[in-house]
Image (tube, rainbow, N blue to C red):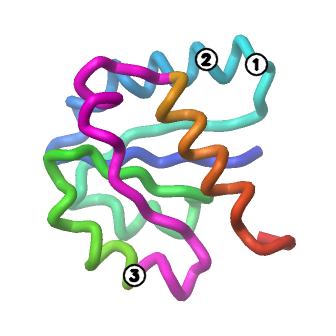
C-alpha cells in the first residue's frame, strides 16, 4: 500500500481534502492510504510516506521538507491553490499518483 501524506498548518484544514481524495481512491479501487498531519509533526511521518503534499498555507516549508525528504527518496510538492481551495480531491490524488510514478523503480 502506498501512503500519501498531506501537510498543513494545524493538521485540520486538510481533513476535507483527505476525505475527498479517499473517496476518489475508493472509486478507482486504489490501494493507497491518505493522511494529514500538521507541519510540526511531518518529520516523524516522512519515513512512512511515499509522497508528501503541502497545503498552500505551508508552502514556505517546501525547501526544508524537500531537503529532509530527499535522502529518503520521498518527493515533496505544494498542492495547487485552486485545487486546494475548491477541494478537488481527484486532481490532488492525480498529482500524488504522478509523483509516485515518477519515482525510480524499487521505491
- Would residue 72 appear left or right of 104 to someone viewing this image? left
Q: Which mark is residue 24?
A: 2
Mark 3, secondary structure of its residue: helix
> Is the residue 9 above or below the residue 59 in the image?
above
Name which residue lies at 61% across and 17% down: 24
Mark 1, secondary structure of its residue: loop
Mark 1 / mark 3, whichever is N-terminal: 1
Name which residue lies at 18% across and 54% down: 58
Q: CA distance from mark 3 to mark 2?
A: 29 Å
Q: Which residue is tagged 1?
A: 28
Q: Residue furthest bottom?
A: 71
- Would residue 80 appear left or right of 28 to someone viewing this image? left
Closer to viewer: mark 3 or mark 2: 2
Whether the residues at callouts 2 and 1 have beta carbons within 8 Å, the answer is yes
What x and y, as percent, mark residue 44?
40, 67
Is residue 88 in the magenta section?
yes
Residue 62 falls in image quadrant: bottom left
Whether the residues at callouts 3 and 2 have beta carbons within 8 Å, the answer is no
**Image quarter hosting the N terminus:** top right
- Would residue 60 appear left or right of 46 to someone viewing this image? left
Q: CA distance from mark 1 to mark 3?
A: 31 Å
Q: Which residue is tagged 3?
A: 68
Range of magenta residues = 68-89
Q: Which mark is residue 87?
A: none
Name which residue lies at 47% across and 48% down: 5
Mark 3 / mark 2, whichever is N-terminal: 2
Mark 3 Cα within 10 Å, few/some/many (few <14, many 20+)?
A: some
- Would residue 56 appear left or right of 68 to someone viewing this image? left
Mark 2, secondary structure of its residue: helix
Residue 30 falls in image quadrant: top right
Amino acid at each position: 500500500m502506498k501512503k500519501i501524506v498531506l501537510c498543513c498548518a494545524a493538521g485540520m484544514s486538510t481533513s476535507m481534502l483527505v476525505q475527498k481524495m479517499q473517496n476518489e481512491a475508493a472509486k478507482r479501487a486504489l490501494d493507497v492510504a491518505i493522511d494529514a498531519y500538521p507541519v510540526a509533526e511531518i518529520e516523524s511521518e516522512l519515513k512512512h510516506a511515499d509522497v508528501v503534499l503541502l497545503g498552500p498555507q505551508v508552502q514556505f516549508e517546501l525547501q526544508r521538507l524537500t531537503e529532509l525528504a530527499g535522502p529518503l527518496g520521498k518527493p515533496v510538492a505544494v498542492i495547487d491553490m485552486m485545487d486546494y481551495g475548491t477541494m478537488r480531491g481527484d486532481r490532488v490524488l492525480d498529482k500524488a499518483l504522478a509523483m509516485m510514478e515518477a519515482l525510480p523503480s524499487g521505491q
